[in-house]
Image (cartoon, rainbow, N blue to C red):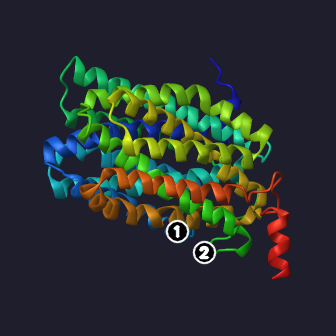
Amino acid sequence: MKISKNIYRPEYFLLLMAVAASLAFSVWLALLNNFAIEAAAFSGREIGILQSLREIPGFLAFTAVFILLILREQVFVLLAVIVLGIGVAITGLLPSEYGLYFTTVLMSIGFHYYYTLQQSLTLQWIEKERSPVVLGKLSSAASVAALVAFGCVWLGIEYFEVEYRWLYLAAGVAAIILGIVGWIIFPYFPHKVPQRKHLLMRQRYWLYYSLTFMGGARRQIFVVFAGFMMVEKFGYSAANIALLFLINHAINAIVAPKIGHFIARFGERRILTLEYIGLIIIFTAYAFVESATVAAVLYVLDHLLFAMAIAIRTYFQKIADPADIASTASVSFTINHIAAVVIPASFGILWLYSPALVFLAGAGMAVASLVLARLVPNNPSEGNEVIQKLQTLKSKA
């Protein structure tokens, strides 16, 4: 049987890597809080330290541009997925505080390099008109993979009493195998525009940098503290958390491609505005919620809004010099993780005093993000990076 040449398009390579990374990371994330509490006796302090350590490789993502001096981006992204798989595979074999710190950092190196390169390659390989839709498909593919991962975790724990270490091992090995498959079957895809392979920051990208920074801060509230609240405050088991993630990704698999179409139709400004208004409401509600069911609903809605962050990337693609994409993807990932390195540890200490204050601080971040989103033009392009009124005021000043 002949395989269609269409399967060897860059889009399908990106989809395969999205599936591989999502399988491994989803199992790691689904088990993390329960594994940390049950196997390593973590409190809010240790989980905050772990999450800060996890974000250090993201903070160092700018180093990707130097590695690209000796590696092609396509090869680099494959290696990143394999390293991610190795880190997840050995997590369950080191059930101690420092063992968990080590495997988390290793996993995170692969994870953060992968997502830096995925963004770069997508914006380089896919046309501007199609990129919101393709990014939506990538998010959907990752969610389908996460559905499989969370479903296996839930079934494994609830019905077969599988130990955490075997679940971690299976997920990590699956990612490694898919990375090797991607290496073998896909040809090299050339770039349309040669990339600048040095660090750069351009003044005209300031709004993109700002939105990216705030996005990193917002992400920590969800990834670190909303999940930890489910376990610590409401007593969710590992199976419950896996089921909750299953619901999240089932919804995202359906909705993410539609959000891509919405961005293409209505523009980045409107979609980001909707996201941040929703976050203000959700983070404020987190601070006062006393019902495990209501908390779960908020958690699902919070995750749903994540897909709207695609609009930040498509906004950048529209305003960017095509030759800047690889370098700026590395720099922006570092910017995204400045807050991510600081917030988990510092807010982990705040959590010990008052969990509600953590979420109210998150609502304040969402307000700041909303203000920034309103500065995005309706039709962004090179030379039209910020709404014209602000551009006029700056030029007069």
Locate residue 91 relative to residue 23 in the image: left or right.
left
Which quadrant of the rendered structure holds the C terminus?
A: bottom right
User: Does 140 appear above or below 101?
Assistant: above
The numbered mark at residue 199 is: 2
Residue 326 visible within the image: yes
Relative height, residue 173 to residue 54 (above, below): above
**Residue type marked 1:** Phe
Q: Nearer the viewer, residue 236 or 354?
A: 354
Q: Secondary structure at mark 2?
A: loop
Q: How packed is label 2: few (under 14 Cα within 10 Å), some, or many (20 or more)?
A: some
Q: Quadrant of residue 59?
A: bottom left
Position of the N terminus, as image quadrant, is: top right
Q: CA distance from mark 1 to mark 2?
A: 7 Å
Residue found 14% across the figure and 48% down from its top: 40
Residue that numbered label 1 is attached to: 62
Q: Tag 1: Cα neighbours inside 10 Å, few (<14), some, or many (≥20)?
A: many
Is there a contact, CB below 8 Å, between mark 1 and mark 2? yes
